[in-house]
Amino acid sequence: MTTHHTRTAGRLLPLLSTDPERLGPWRLLARLGAGGMGTVYLARSPQGRTAALKAVHPAHAARPQARERFRSEVRAMRDLQGSAPGSRRFAPVIDADTESERPWLATAYVPAPTLREAVERHGRWPLPAVRILGAELADALLTVHRAGLVHRDIKPSNVLAALDGPRLIDFGISAFAGEQRHTDTGQALGSPGYLAPEQAEGGPATPAGDVFALAGVLVFAATGSGPFGEGRPEELIFRARHEAPRLDGIDDDAVRSLLARCLAPAAEGRPTAGELGRELSGGPGAMAFADCLPPPVLTDIGLRATHDALLPRPLRVEENATVVPDGGGGPSRRSVLLGAAGVLGVSAGSTAVAYAAGRLTRGTGETAAGAGPGAPSPSPSSADSKWAAPAPLWTHRGRLDTWGRPVPADGTLVTAPGIFSREMYGLATDDGSVRWTVTDVGGDQPVVTPDGETVIVQRLPGAGGGLGLVDARTGSTRVSTGLDINTFFMNRTPVVAVSGRTVCVVGHDPDAADKDEARLRPQPVVAYDLDSDSVLWRAEVPMISEGWVEGVAAGGHFILLGWDRVHAFAVSDGRLGWERDLGAGLVDHMAGGDRFYSEPPDRRITALPDDSVLIAGRGLLHLDAATGDSRWSLVPDEDPDLAEAAERYGYADRARYGTPCVVGETVYLNQMGAVHAIDLTTYGTRWSWVPESDRERMEPPPAGPVSAGGLVFPTISGALTLVALDGETGELRWQLMESDGYSSEVSAVVAENRLYVHVGDTIRALPL
């Protein structure tokens, strides 16, 4: 199971409301990362031992092949524990249960960055460190090969740079030497750029393929780039077969010659892992691994080793909804149950990559025969090679946080501040270079004013209870004054909505001594003018959320989405223009009836161009923004097919509809693993797109699509990073695949006729 437990830079991410509290005896504390087959958690045993616990996604746990692959991983890791010199280079298995409803594996938690993170964040390594790294990993490989196994997915993100020596992790696609293993769809397994040519062609697994990959890892450590550069998967595979590796950045002739032999296209000419280790070893008196590491990497390791700040786990949301009859006065309703049950798909492997040399030409995106408007359009099979994405205008890698999404602002792409790094960057949209950096930023997702001039963050040094204001072009900062509101208890941004240069801020009573006292008092609502640095008006509302409030500006109102009500304050003077109940079928219910929670339910509110708002969650509610009158509502609980599908695919206890994306009179939204285009004049379904495999696995609500240039981009988190659908027909136009295996925390934003795709530590700018 190749899981990007390293994609999050070793940081602790909060648990989601859908995560379990425990697996076996292990209490889950935080997320370390996620991948196509499962999630990696930081976990603690009843005895206080900390572990990295991998858990298979529920959808895959029902698949016999996926379970057997996971069993093989556990067996492989246990077989490698012993007294051999290389055994210390693996994370020891502490506990496992491969037969439970959700299989899991607990290994010793290693507080260390991956090699990819260490190099991208702190620069390439000196040659002595590269030699020791190679010698230690070669010993590890020798142990693997003597056990009759082949790792098959050695790459920088599968190497941990621990203080006492590197660790080789992730044996999810390991195999017995000589075994010929494929995915269900005939794809090769491995990571392009480090994938040996014979492995890319589907040949049997051999130790020589691991040596090839390890040499590529050492080139990355020494130069900051892989041995065949950057590019699409098929480009990297082509270069590995037909071009010499790029070793110009390695100054030592002997090391350069050794790595060239390891990267030979023919497996017969490569040295063994033992030979590689002997040639790299410094012999008696060689320096220790930690003594050779760059000082910034040592600091990084030290911070991880001492960091014990565990993020709180969100409470669970229990939903019980019934059909909400629409009131009169709106347009005629149709019996709309949005699409058939969504198909979440199943995974064929972990870091599966398509070897498709012909994928550089675009296809026409034809749907299956007989598919008409409103019928699901199947995605192409993984064997199709004609759905090429446009070439990126630029790619920025590194200096990014995997949490949150970039925000476009006045020629600048603003990255979300890191949860622990507390840094925010402004990238120039013309070439992806770093335009400015702001440090000591607090809070979560930044908010940008409609004119793109000002970036608003929750906290800056000296902000107190005010807001941090950053110039989008220059990165210069200032602090708001006179808000007289407590924003420290908010888990997410206190900026609910922006109308022009007026900001609506929701926080807590500044006189409350602590969060327990604040939750018993009404929440203050403040309208703040950015230009005059003054408060325009103040209002109060019954406690909406102790952590995060959803809202929009529409119809002359700031509209706040509360626990069971919607509140609308006039932008001009703060008068309560209207408020209304959501209705029993649209209200989320917390366990034990507790309506105060640190994380919001998965409902989202979106402003439409015609001065209306659409609320999506368990159901859909379309309201007039000026009056609060209902135009249309849908809660599909009582439809047996949808109810059964929701139970089967894990949507029974959470939102079924993601954040809406509105273009003209069409709204695009996720619903239980599919994408639907809804006509806002008739509320009928124009088309639906249902993924056919886990390669196009869709993110659950509140994730939603984005649209631009006549295309719709669903939020994907499988091996495919992105798919582009025709906004009129739902037909597939192109798709983007990650070269580093399955991706996680994917987000996409549109600005200036470009699509910016953020995956892990990389942003790509694609033309539209």
Image (cartoon, rainbow, N blue to C red):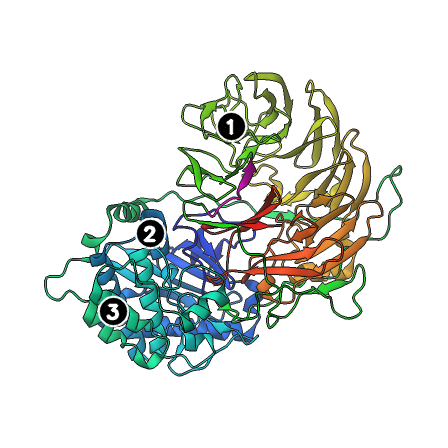
Dot 3 and dot 2 residues touching (CB under 8 Å): no
Residue at coordinates 68% horizontally, 39% vertically from top-left?
A: 605
The answer to whether residue 416 shows anywhere in this view is no
Q: Position of residue 8 (x, y in %)?
A: 43, 51
Name the quadrant containing residue 41.
bottom left
Name the quadrant containing residue 648.
bottom right
Position of 518 relative to 164 (above/below): above
Disc 3 or 2, which lies upstream in sequence? 2
- The magenta region covers 402-409
Front disc: 3 or 1: 3
Q: CA distance from mark 3 to mark 1?
A: 59 Å
Q: Main secondary structure of the magenta part?
A: loop
Position of 241 relative to 462 (above/below): below
Q: Position of residue 397 (x, y in %)?
A: 43, 50
Front disc: 2 or 1: 2
Which kind of residue does numbered mark 3 sit on?
Ser
At mark 2, the secondary structure is helix
- Per the image, is 395 magenta? no
Q: What residue does disc 1 label?
A: 487
Residue at coordinates 50% horizontally, 58% vertically from top-left?
A: 743
**In front of the other: 763 or 318:** 763
Label annotation for residue 118 = 2
Label annotation for residue 460 = none
